Amino acid sequence: MIPLSSQLWMGYGVRTYVDLLNIYAGNAEVPAHFRRTRSSALDFTLTFKYEIRK
Amino acid sequence: MKTPDHFTNWIKTRLEENPLEPPAEAWNTISESLDLEGAWEGINQDLELDGLWTSIDQRLLQAEQLLWWEKAGKAVSGLAAMLVLALPLWFQLADPTEALVAGQEVSETDLTQLPGANAGTDVASTSTNPLASPDREQREPAAERQDAAAATQFAEPENVSATGGAEGPQYPIPPSSIASIPLPKGRQPRTPNASASGIHQPGAGANGAAAGQGAFRSTKGEETAPHTLPLVQLSSREGELALAEPKLTVPKTTTQAPVREEAVVAKKATPAGNWRVGLGGSGRLSYLLNQKTFHAMDKSSLTTPLPGLRKSFSLQAERPLSARLVFLSDLVVHNEAGQRYEEYHSGIYGTTDTRLRYTQLNALLAYSPSKSALAARPYTRWLGGYPEAGCTRHNCPARWGYRTLRGSTVATRPGCCWGWNT
């Protein structure tokens, strides 16, 4: 995290996601291969957070 | 029900029932009138094969250019990823606070070995004092050296310890000398509680002789809280001490001392357990792993899988659990996943873009290896956690437009997450 002020923070980074189970339960309208699909993603994130002080 | 064509049926029946045979010359006349050679020549001209091959050649050249741009894009992406990874690590490696803390520990260790530390003698008169160093002797007259040594005599030089507590040495600072040192903007003067961190503090000695003498004054002459100078300054050979008048300058280390104080105060002033809430967004390279993707990876396949470029927006909250461990919770209100395929579809070679939209909840733990999860400076951390998502919509657009299937079956999507951020 990078402090922008005493209570405001900025962060950036990289995340990877890999699903463990099927991505989709499927129905009559959707192609059948979605029933056996897993999703993976590589995210480049940017966040701004405010610290709540009591 | 298709209505019968009575006229066509009548003509067909009449021709089939006709008993007369056509003459053989009739077919020859018809064949000659067809002019097949001229017909093929006209067809050949209509095809414009030269132009067709030129067009194909341009398409192939364009494909080669796309490959070149793909390579350039990969190189740029790799450099950007290296920069993203290296920049916060550089922040950590170039952290002046930790370097100063390490230097302080070394200096304090050296001080315990000073000849006059335990003997109760004047440290300024020892050879470790830069005022008495040979370089110093070459630069300044003897009279000035004596003044400087007199101004930096310690009020209580005995019991010099590495911890610097209440029994540590007390170094009174002449107000007339310190009044000329302005506080850097944004720096806070040292508080009496900071003495526990190992910095020696003037004006708070056991004998009280120097009480009030170390008061730090601003440029306007207003007296503020007592200020301390770390003892490391006295052993520094990079600059000259700022304690004596009239020609001494502020050493380089005095500009670093408030930085360390600020970091120490920030660490203490930021209690563990404060929540941080905010907003987050991400750009995403998404990949769907299914039978179609694996089939498309085959070289003989006419389908090419490409990652989908997606985005997400989230509400985030985190709470430090310790100096190194932080709990993170992300509610991703708009989370997209998907895949692109370049493939033949209904006789057209185009791009099929599959989009899956989710609402996702992430529970993550972030670990910071440098004990600085609460510090008011840049730091890095590693992420690991458990995302849970529900699919709310499935879009399957092709080159001719989007085909949206709403109200699709909601599916759970537990998974795992690993990452890194600042």
Image (cartoon, coloured by chain):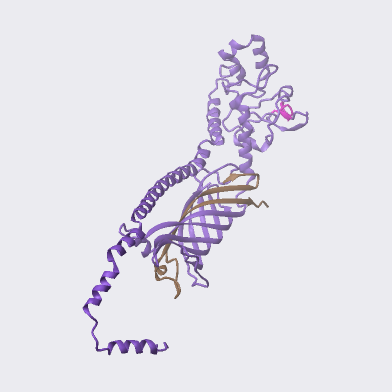
Chain colours: A brown, B purple
Q: Position of residue B337 (x, y in %)?
A: 48, 61
Quick check: B52 above or below B215? below
- Report the residue that reaches farthest toward the left: B24
Main structural element of the magenta stretch: helix, strand or loop?
loop
Q: Position of residue B175 (x, y in %)?
A: 73, 24
Say if the magenta span includes residue B135. Answer: no
Quarter of the image for the N terminus of chain B: give it.
bottom left
Tell me where the magenta segment starts and ends, as one range. B207-217
Front position in the image: B94 or B404: B404
Is residue B410 something one can see in this rendering? yes
Is residue B159 something one can see in this rendering? no
Front position in the image: B346 or B254: B346
Say if the magenta span includes residue B208. Answer: yes
Quick check: B146 above or below A3? above
- The number of discs equals 0
Quick check: A53 above or below B186? below
Q: Would residue B177 appear left or right of B50 to someone viewing this image?
A: right
Q: Would residue B204 appear left or right of B37 to someone viewing this image?
A: right
Residue at 55% in and 20% down: B115
Residue at 49% in and 55% down: B284
Quick check: B226 above or below B314? above
Q: Position of residue B26 (x, y in %)?
A: 25, 77
Q: Position of residue B413 (x, y in %)?
A: 47, 65
| Quarter of the image where one finds residue B255 | top right
| Quarter of the image where one finds residue A2 | top right
